[in-house]
Amino acid sequence: MYDCIVVGGGHAGCEAAHISAVLGLKTLLVTSNIKNIADMPCNPSIGGTAKGIIVREIDALGGIMGVVADQSHFQIKMLNNGKGPAVRSLRAQADKITYPKIMLETLRKTANLEIIEGMVEDIITNNHKVTGVILENGTKIEGKTVILTTGTYTKGNILIGSENTPGGPHGEKRSNYLSDNLKKLGLTIQRLKTGTPPRIKKSSIDFTKMNEENGDKKYYTFSHDIEPQYEINNQEKCYLLYTNEKTHEIIRNNLNQSAMYGGHVTGVGPRYCPSIEDKIVRFADKERHQLFLEPESLHYDEWYLQGFSTSMPRDVQEKMVHSLKGLENAEITKYAYAIEYDAIDPLEMKSSLENKIIENLFTAGQINGTSGYEEAAAQGLIAGINAHHKLKGIEPLVLKRNEAYIGVLIDDLVTKGTGEPYRMLTSRAEFRLILRHDNADLRLREIGYQNGTIDEERYQKLIAKKSQIKAIKNTLSTHNISLNNDTKEIFKNNNLEVPTFSTSLYILLKRPEINIEFLKNFISLDASPSILEEVEIEVKYEGYIAKAYKEAEKMLKLEEKEIPKDIDYQDVGNLASEARQKLEKVRPVTMGQAARISGVNPSDLSILSVYLKKKYNK
């Protein structure tokens, strides 16, 4: 018998299986095709707006996505670098061949982890408690916990125009019965849709008609523990191009042939990553839409046309692609398609990602209604940790909204649910100034250490970093600049306003035009660029950060007010019917979670608060 059975070898499954095994559980990863482990059926990129911060958080908690991305990318850049630190995120173009190869090697080297090929079509339960899985061939495998990370393989349908072909990504074999069997056990199943754009043969592209998009001239890593694995001046180029009126006209004239607009799609698609035909309809006033051409791998000749996802027939796709500047003679190597698949209702999950109906059954990734490799990996990591905790009788790891984007992601799912593929955005995080790229390890590495996913060596590295940051800030606070002629000359030579009075370097750094590099004119600052960046952000945004923490404290007070598990909402008089229905479905654990449920108003919260005080003295 296995302690943990992970079903599915995508990004959620890889993280779940790895961390479960690292924590000492005898773990089995069941995947339909070992060659597809950590596959990237859509864009072979890791990170992006908000998503890059999630990858940093995964690494801070002991996950492996960041390390593998650092070892396999051929271009990396910091998005929103000209904006404030709250919205900066890393994005890397990972090699579609190298990334899965390194991930598989990593998993194969992990102790306590076994990998087999097979299609899981049912789970075994006893008295609403999972006890194993059943493969397509009838083989039964016993397990104390099961983590489902099935991606888009559950009743997947590939849609191109009016064509509807059963299958998973790339036309792989799908799971035909698992979602139906979950439904029989009482889980709610919903139908969702996502899609992917065409791939273009490199030799057929005229890059001279496009704008180059280069990697940054500064070294970056997702991981907090390894050095950059690439040459900064040897990064691959990507290219920027745009749709035009001819493109839009072709799409408008053929809308009825699209799987989506032709009535062939039953699933709900992603609002924040729509198909190109959806963009043309929804944003009819826009004259053009931004697209990117990005290499998929250094090992073959296919390029990814980002932003051009479609479910049009092949002949229409040809016309659409050829209407774009630089792609007039483009050869399409893989046609775009939409894919429909089954997912569960995330409101039926606990914050630990354990199912409310079937004990010891955990779910992670697209089966929970999310989209994106990063969101999937984050859930897999948390599910793996909490499967371990459940078996060991340890309280589950539940990250708060002020602690991590991962906390925001999971809380949104289990509190608000989703009727469309959920994508993480910076706007979803009310404490995003706290949840930055630069401080992921400072926020989460100690939590990882306490939960057994971060070893002593990495923890001591964190302690040393905190100590160094504190020492530099103290040095800046105690070092005043003298307003002598030499000092004035330094300011003038850098086109900066000369201070009118002596001040500490700490106060000086708060000025918008002053950076920490400039302070090296007055004092030696022997520290890594990441340490100095952290100091600069903490000093410059000190007031705003303090305000964010104060707001977070208000939220935490509500989070501390627990709601008893056995509460009967029918017994709470004067609750609005919608609020009663939503509270009964979600079963919030705290008043803070109750406050975030759509349809539960402040008046409902007041009534509930009075009821809890009267009946439970809470």
Image (cartoon, rainbow, N blue to C red):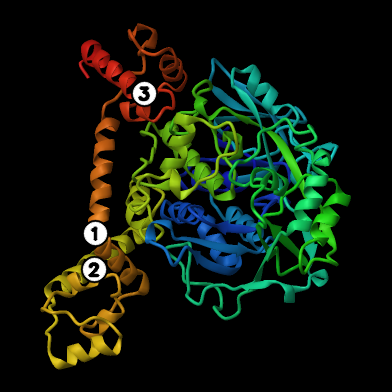
Question: What residue type is disc 3 on?
Answer: Asn
Establish if 386 lies above or below 67: above
Query: Vertically, is 216 above or below 196?
Result: below
User: Callout 2, which amino acid?
Assistant: Lys
Viewer-nearest of discs 1 and 3: 3
Residue 7 visible in the displayed image:
yes
Q: Which structural element holds mark 2?
A: loop
Q: Which residue is mark 2?
A: 510
Spatial CA span between label 3 and label 2: 40 Å
| Nearer to me, 319 or 374 | 319
Under circle 1, the secondary element is: helix
Label 2 crowd bin: few (<14), some (14–19), many (20+), radius 10 Å: some
Name the residue: 18% across, 75% down: 505
Circle 3 crowding by C-alpha within 10 Å: few under 14, some 14–19, many from 20 = some
CA–CA distance in space, label 1 to label 3: 33 Å
Residue annotated with mark 3: 601
Residue 360 appears in the figure: no
User: Residue sitting at 66 percent across and 69 percent down?
Assistant: 239
Front one among 519 and 376: 519
Residue linked to disc 1? 542
* Residue occupying the far front of the picture: 285
- Kindly check if marks 1 and 2 are in contact, taking CB atoms under 8 A apart as contact: yes
Percent position (x, y) of residue 140? 68, 28
Q: Residue 459's image quarter?
A: bottom left
Residue occupying image coordinates x 12% and y 85% = 483
Q: Assign the N terminus to one quadrant of the image.
A: top right
Q: Residue at x 37, y 44 (%)?
A: 430
Q: Is residue 359 left or right of residue 324?
A: left
Whether label 3 touches label 2, CB < 8 Å: no
Which of marks 3 and 1 precedes in the sequence?
1
